[in-house]
Structure formats: C-alpha cells, structure tokens
Image: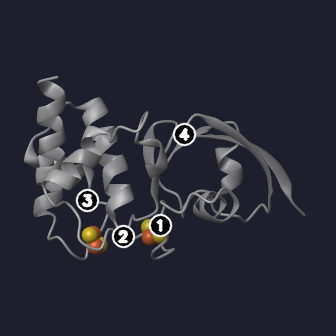
Amino acid sequence: MTTRITVTVNGEEHTAEVEPRTLLVHFLRDQLGLTGTHWGCDTSNCGVCTVTLDGTPVKSCTVLAVMAHNHSVGTVEGLERDGKLDPVQQGFVECHGLQCGFCTPGMMLTARWLLDNNPDPSETEIREAISGQSCRCTGYENIVRSVQWAARQEVTR
Ligand code: FES
Ligand code: FES
C-alpha cells in the first residue's frame, strides 16, 4: 500500500507515492535523488540527516515522509542560489569548517536557520544551535568560526 504525497522541496513541488513507513530522509535521498541529506544513525542521535521543515531544522530520520505532505522542506541543495554559494557555505570554505563532510549539510542548514533568526549569535548560541548534531572530525571549533564568518558577511552586507 502506498500513499500519494505532495511536498515542496527547495521551492519545487514534488508529488510521489510513498509507503506509510517511509522516512523523510529516504524519500529525499532515494525517491528525489537529493543525496546531500545524509543518513547516519537512524536513531535520532547524529543529526547528519538534518533538513528544514517549514523553516525549522528537523532530523529527517525522525519524520515520516507522509508528515511532510503539503509542507516545505529545505535541503542543502537549496542553499546555493543562482550559482552563488550561501554565505554559510562560503564560511565553511573560508574557515575549513569541514573535513570528511558527512555532518556538513546538516550543520549548514542549522547555521542558515540560526542566522535567519539571530543574525549576530554569540559563540554559545552557535554551539547550542548545533548541539543536536555530531561531528567526528573537526572538534567543532572551525564549524563555529564558519558560522561567525557568515554572520559577519551578512551583518556588513
Ligand atoms: S540519521 Fe542520525 S539523527 Fe538522523
Ligand atoms: S566533518 Fe566529518 S563528521 Fe563533521
């Protein structure tokens, strides 16, 4: 048995048949081919599957695809606009905010959400915002610097 859902992903409407048990992370990766959203633990611990649902970061392994019906999802593929990197993406480049890159899409989406809601966050606020997401490589220091870099660009823009 499948259910027909319509989900707006990165501004584009998609209609598809999904099983009721299909997780949003699998819908995005396997049915829409948006593999920038990673899948790590499946137990809601690692946060690498983070996307936005109606603008708020969620772990897409804890959301059923049917729950996204008639809602808007944002993935890392939607951050770049007209061939121009989002300041958050540029910050990760400038400040070496990634090593293996596995956690990076989710980190960048949470950072984007943070700066949209708090354009000049303190270091503590940045660390708190990404606290639900694990990075095995960077020690978080350069991730924080990357978000601070993006915040500076946006404040002075
Ligand atoms: S895959 Fe680890 S929290 Fe979703
Ligand atoms: S860069 Fe490797 S897990 Fe974060």
Residue ID at (29%, 74%): 100
**Camera-nearest label, 2 or 3:** 2
Q: Which mark is residue 10?
A: 4
Q: Earlier in the sequence, mark 4 or mark 3?
A: 4
Disc 1 residue crowd, few under 14, some 14–19, many 20+, Cα 10 Å: many
Q: How far apart are the two marked residues, 1 and 3, measured between alpha carbons?
A: 17 Å
Q: Which marked residue is nearer to the observer: mark 1 or mark 3?
A: 1
Circle 1 residue: 38
Q: Hey, what amino acid is under mark 4?
A: Asn
In space, the residues marked 2 and 4 are separated at their CA atoms by: 20 Å
Q: Quadrant of the C terminus?
A: top left
Which residue is outermost to the right?
Answer: 1
Query: Which circle's residue, 2 or 4, is located before the other in the chain?
Result: 4
Q: Secondary structure at mark 3?
A: loop
Asked whether mark 3 lies closer than 8 Å to ligand 1, one says no
Q: Is residue 112 left or right of residue 29?
A: left
Colour option used = one colour
Residue depicted at x 32% and y 39%: 86
Question: What is the CA distance from the residue labelled 4 to the residue labelled 3?
Answer: 25 Å
Residue on which disc 2 sits: 102
Residue at 47%, 43% in the rendered image: 78
> Which amino acid lies under the numbered mark 3 shown in the image of this protein?
Ser
Q: Earlier in the sequence, mark 2 or mark 3?
A: 2
Badge 1 marks a residue whose secondary structure is loop
Q: Could you tell me residue 145's position as x and y percent?
A: 11, 52
Mark 4: give few (<14), some (14-19) or many (20+) Cα within 10 Å: some
The residue at the far front in this view is: 83
- Which of the 4 image quarters holds residue 122? top left
